[in-house]
Image (cartoon, helix red, strand yellow):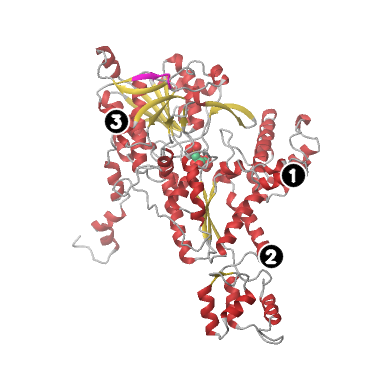
């Protein structure tokens, strides 16, 4: 080093400080990798056992009874200490095993810890046991692409976000052939068990694999993953067995930190409404959690919109002796009116800025759009069913897709049986902006889900908001309130008598925030009012001070739109998710070691302190119901939507008016801070979870 010239690039590159600060691995990563999450107490027993708990009841779906006969009668299973186990039982527990694992669906923070927990426990009982990771999700199983998971691989990923260790994919194992190929891969690898880390669709897959693999003696265990938070399991008696899927807490915290930063910027720069679309394919759990984390001014919960009833319309129709069927469910137009109402109310108090949160899946709850989605799903599925080329290959452009729909209205569709698409549908559909029509017609994902994340929902809604606000502005109803003290000081400087002018130009001259009269919508209309009240003569100019007041009252509606999804999905897990996932991995091992199959590893009592967490297995087949997918009814795990009777939703409803802050008080924004995984300031559970457990 001494021989190098101090200013040379070579000197700089070789300097220890340079290599320290430019290393791929920073101090936070080193700390994360070396952190050991605590284990649930039961896992400190040398052996475990499982106890069947028939007292947890679920009603079976008939189709599930037919298609999943070997696992439909599974019970909830509790993992209990097994120290009393017989000698042969202990030997069986420690037998050498091969276990396969794969991720499925979108990444969720904590996935690597599931593998770490599984790996550590497998090796603890028998160092010769092996864990194989199938690459890129279910494809790895179908194509027999896998790696052996090693200690160094696990150590590099402990407490780290993403699914990069073995990657993920969304392929569905949905045919007899794919099932047979999957079984062959597992038999070739001499697997004892397979662990599927996935969401509702992937756990559905896990149940079908468990059924298919049963006779071969290969166990299949699911793990509840998804940032959407929509895998929640309650028994028929409303006892919570799985309060939330893993990854939800981290994603919500990561989104919330960004949203909270926007509340800080918005209230500093006071000129933008920030519109934040937040992931969550259908359910609005993430939005509800972000609302509690940030106290943003406006947060919409899709489930509430679907439940909406316009009582005024119902009453009006009743008076005419009629029933108004359109009074049920929220329309896009109505939603945009609601948003405008709040924007106008805040502006009247001088707050022409704010932050709103829109759930990604909101359109699913808007009646008129949902009808389109279902109809188009059916049309596309039916087309694919009878043609060699699929719909999107046959009609690659928007225009060609629209032409196909038009043909249907003329009765020229395939098999002439598409009564579901009529002229009225075509008319309404064509009134939507092209990018939205394109979104509604795009390819469904492999599970037949509509891909909401690809539709610019926020633009659709905000276009309607802007349009209506400009009407309100024209009507003189959208104005920025002028603070009385500010008005007085300007008037005094320009020698006007404030009270006199206030009565002439404001409609509420006694209030603290003054609103310019509705008839004054331009400098010309202002001049006319001043002439009529003899403040100025016909040929005079409007005084500068009054121009200043008018301009200040005249709103510009400026928005910034943001999408929070992939960023939070890739965040490193919170302390809660680190512990939750590590223990899920351990639970999966203990279910396997005790011979369980067709079960989902879960932790009961997540809402309680860590010492009360209980590892359990939940029978997946019992969670099934029939759902429309690609135009057909399919057996899938039922998604949990936001429960409008839950504590968290009721509390949100009670507090949202305060967070809206359409009053003279300061905004009530909350700063959740960044995602942390250690330290006393770290929050230990999602807020919605805490509220629901009261
Ligand atoms: P999973 O249900 O697979 O966990 O995925 C969740 C999710 O992140 C949704 O919130 C989002 O709508 C979707 O995945 C996005 O899908 P993609 O990754 O294919 O863009």
Task: Return the residue at label 1.
Answer: 317
Query: Is residue 52 covered in magenta?
Result: yes
Judge the density around disc 2: few (<14), some (14-19), many (≥20) Cα neighbours within 10 Å: few
- Disc 1 from disc 3: Cα separation: 66 Å
- Give the extent of the magenta segment: 50-55
Residue under the image location 30 percent in, 62 percent down: 9
Q: Which of the 4 quarters of the picture holds residue 16?
A: bottom left
The label shown at residue 36 is none
Q: Nearer the viewer, mark 1 or mark 3?
A: 1
Name the N-terminal-most of marks 1 and 3.
3
Tell me, yes or no, if residue 565 can be seen here.
no
Q: Seen in the image, is 150 located left or right of residue 64?
A: left
The residue closer to the viewer here, 515 or 38, is: 515
Name the N-terminal-most of marks 2 and 3.
3
Residue under the image location 30 percent in, 44 percent down: 32
Quarter of the figure with the N terminus: bottom left
The residue closer to the viewer here, 277 or 456, is: 277
Q: Position of residue 109 (x, y in %)?
A: 40, 41
- Disc 2 from disc 3: Cα separation: 68 Å
Task: Return the residue at label 3.
Answer: 120
**From the viewer's perspective, is residue 681 above or below residue 604?**
below
Residue under the image location 68 percent in, 62 percent down: 471
Q: Position of residue 181 (x, y in %)?
A: 49, 22
Q: Nearer the viewer, mark 2 or mark 3?
A: 2
Judge the density around disc 3: few (<14), some (14-19), many (≥20) Cα neighbours within 10 Å: some
Q: Nearer the viewer, mark 1 or mark 2?
A: 1
Task: Return the residue at label 2.
Answer: 475
Quarter of the figure with the C terminus: top left
Q: Are marks 1 and 2 in contact (CB under 8 Å)?
A: no
- Residue lying at the far left in this picture: please name it: 2
């Amino acid at each position: 080093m001494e021989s190098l010239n101090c200013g040379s690039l070579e000197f700089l590159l070789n300097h220890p400080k340079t290599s320290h600060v430019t290393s791929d691995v920073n101090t936070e990563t080193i700390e994360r990798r070396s952190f050991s999450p605590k284990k649930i107490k039961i896992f400190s027993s040398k052996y475990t056992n499982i106890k069947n708990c028939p007292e947890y009841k679920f009603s079976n779906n008939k189709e599930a009874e037919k298609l999943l006969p070997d696992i439909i009668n599974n019970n909830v299973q509790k993992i209990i200490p097994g120290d009393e186990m017989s000698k042969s039982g202990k030997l069986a527990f420690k037998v050498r095993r091969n276990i396969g694992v794969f991720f499925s669906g979108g990444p969720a923070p904590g996935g690597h810890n599931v593998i770490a927990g599984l790996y550590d426990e497998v090796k603890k009982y028998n160092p010769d046991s092996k864990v194989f990771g199938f690459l890129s999700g279910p494809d790895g199983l179908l194509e027999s692409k896998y790696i052996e998971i090693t200690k160094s691989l696990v150590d590099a990923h402990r407490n780290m976000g993403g699914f990069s260790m073995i990657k993920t994919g969304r392929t569905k194992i949905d045919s007899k052939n794919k099932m047979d190929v999957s079984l062959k891969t597992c038999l070739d690898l001499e697997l004892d068990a397979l662990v599927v880390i996935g969401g509702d669709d992937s756990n559905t897959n896990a149940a079908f694999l468990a059924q298919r693999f049963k006779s071969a003696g290969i166990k299949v265990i699911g793990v509840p993953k998804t940032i959407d938070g929509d895998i929640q399991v309650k028994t028929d008696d409303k006892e919570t067995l799985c309060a939330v899927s893993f990854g939800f807490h981290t994603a919500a915290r990561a989104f919330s930190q960004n949203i909270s930063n926007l509340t800080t910027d918005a209230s500093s720069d006071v000129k933008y409404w920030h519109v934040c679309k937040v992931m969550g394919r259908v359910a609005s759990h993430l939005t509800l959690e972000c609302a509690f984390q940030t106290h943003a001014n406006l947060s919409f919960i899709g489930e509430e919109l679907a439940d909406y009833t316009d009582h005024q319309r119902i009453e009006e129709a009743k008076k005419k002796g009629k029933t108004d069927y359109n009074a049920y469910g929220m329309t896009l137009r109505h939603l945009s009116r609601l948003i405008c109402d709040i924007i106008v109310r805040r502006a009247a108090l001088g707050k022409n800025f704010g932050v709103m949160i829109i759930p990604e899946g909101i359109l699913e709850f808007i009646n008129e759009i949902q009808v389109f989605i279902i109809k188009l799903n059916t049309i596309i599925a039916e087309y694919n069913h009878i043609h060699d080329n699929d719909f999107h290959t046959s009609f690659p452009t928007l225009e060609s897709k629209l032409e196909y729909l038009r043909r249907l209205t003329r009765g020229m569709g395939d098999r002439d049986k598409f009564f579901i698409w009529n002229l009225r549908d075509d008319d309404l559909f064509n009134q939507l902006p092209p990018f939205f029509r394109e979104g509604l017609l795009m390819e469904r994902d492999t599970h037949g889900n509509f891909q909401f994340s690809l539709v610019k929902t926020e633009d659709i809604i905000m276009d309607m908001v802007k349009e209506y606000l400009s009407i309100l502005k024209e009507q003189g109803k959208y104005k920025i309130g002028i603070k009385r003290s500010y008005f007085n000081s300007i008037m005094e400087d320009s020698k006007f008598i404030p009270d006199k002018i206030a009565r002439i130009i404001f409609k509420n001259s006694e209030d603290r925030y003054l609103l310019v009269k509705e008839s004054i919508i331009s400098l010309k209309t202002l001049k006319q009012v001043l002439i009529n009240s003899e403040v100025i003569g016909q040929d005079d100019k409007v005084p500068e001070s009054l121009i200043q007041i008018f301009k200040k009252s005249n709103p510009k509606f400026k928005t910034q739109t943001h999408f929070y999804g992939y960023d939070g999905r890739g965040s490193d897990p919170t302390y809660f998710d680190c512990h939750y996932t590590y223990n899920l991995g351990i639970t999966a091992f203990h279910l396997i070691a005790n011979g369980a199959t067709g079960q989902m590893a879960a932790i009961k009592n997540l809402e309680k302190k860590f010492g009360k967490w209980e590892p359990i297995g939940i029978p997946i087949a019992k969670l099934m119901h029939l759902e429309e997918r690609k135009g057909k009814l399919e057996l899938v795990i039922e998604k949990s939507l936001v429960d409008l009777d839950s504590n968290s939703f009721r509390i949100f409803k009670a507090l949202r008016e305060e967070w809206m802050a359409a009053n003279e008080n300061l905004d009530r924004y909350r700063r959740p801070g960044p995602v942390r995984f250690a330290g006393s300031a770290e929050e230990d559970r999602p807020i919605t979870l805490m509220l629901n457990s009261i």
